[in-house]
Structures are given as C-alpha cells and as structure tokens.
Image (cartoon, rainbow, N blue to C red):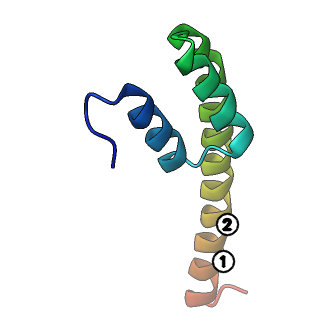
C-alpha cells in the first residue's frame, strides 16, 4: 500500500481500487505526473458516470428478479 506522502502511489492505487482499466489509469497517471490534477477531473467524472450507469442497470435487473420471485412465491402465475 502507498504511504500517505506518496501522492502518485495513492492516486494509482485508488484508480486500481476503483476498477479503472489500463487506458484510464495510464491517462490519469500521465496527468498526475505532470502535476495536472485538474486534468484528471473530466476523466474521473466520465468513469464515475459509467460506473453509475452500471449500478443503475444492475439495480433494474435486481428489481426484475425481485418481482419474479415475489410472483412465484405468491403463485400469481
């Protein structure tokens, strides 16, 4: 694990923990190495939107399964 004073190490580990792919990680690390932290924001925001879409899609699928389970348990078919 990166030490608290190792800014680049912290950023790298956080990107990996967030599930960023190699392309996003490389882009972000290049900007961080240049000290262009504000340049990271559009990339990170875009990836966040992608993750949020995935979560919402997963929630919709869970809702569908919950409804099917409910219907089967109540024998309303």
Residue 1 in the figure: left or right of residue 48: left
Residue 38 in the figure: left or right of residue 43: left
Q: Which residue sits at x=26%, y=28%?
A: 5
Q: Which residue sits at x=60%, y=56%?
A: 59
Q: Position of residue 77 (x, y in %)?
A: 73, 87
Task: Name the quadrant containing residue 42.
Answer: top right
Give the answer, above or below, for where 66 lies relative to 73. above
Give the answer, above or below, for where 9 lies relative to 40. below
Using the image as rendered, state which of residue 63 and residue 70 is in the foreground. Answer: 63
Q: Report the Cα–Cα distance between label 2 and label 1.
A: 6 Å
Total marks shown come to: 2
Circle 1 residue: 68
Looking at the rendered structure, the secondary structure element under dot 1 is helix
Q: Circle 2: is it few (<14), some (14-19), or many (20+) Cα within 10 Å? A: few
Residue 34 in the figure: left or right of residue 46: left
Give the answer, above or below, for where 65 lies relative to 77. above
Task: Name the quadrant containing residue 9.
Answer: top left
Q: Which residue sits at x=68%, y=27%?
A: 27
Q: Where is residue 18 in the image (x, y as percent from the top left)?
A: 52, 45
Does the residue at mark 2 contact the one at mark 1 (Cβ under 8 Å)?
yes
Q: Circle 1: is it few (<14), some (14-19), or many (20+) Cα within 10 Å? A: some
Using the image as rendered, state which of residue 5 and residue 43 is in the foreground. Answer: 5
Task: Name the quadrant containing residue 31.
Answer: top right
Q: Which residue sits at x=49%, y=38%?
A: 12
Q: Position of residue 26 (x, y in %)?
A: 67, 34
Looking at the rendered structure, the secondary structure element under dot 2 is helix
Using the image as rendered, state which of residue 57 and residue 22 is in the foreground. Answer: 22
Circle 2 residue: 64
């Amino acid at each position: 694990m990166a030490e608290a004073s190792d800014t680049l190490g912290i950023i790298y580990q956080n990107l990996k923990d967030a599930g960023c792919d190699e392309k996003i990680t490389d882009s972000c690390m290049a900007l961080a190495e240049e000290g262009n932290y504000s340049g990271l924001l559009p990339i990170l925001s875009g990836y966040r939107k992608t993750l949020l879409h995935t979560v919402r899609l997963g929630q919709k699928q869970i809702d569908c399964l919950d409804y099917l389970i409910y219907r089967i348990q109540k024998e309303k078919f």
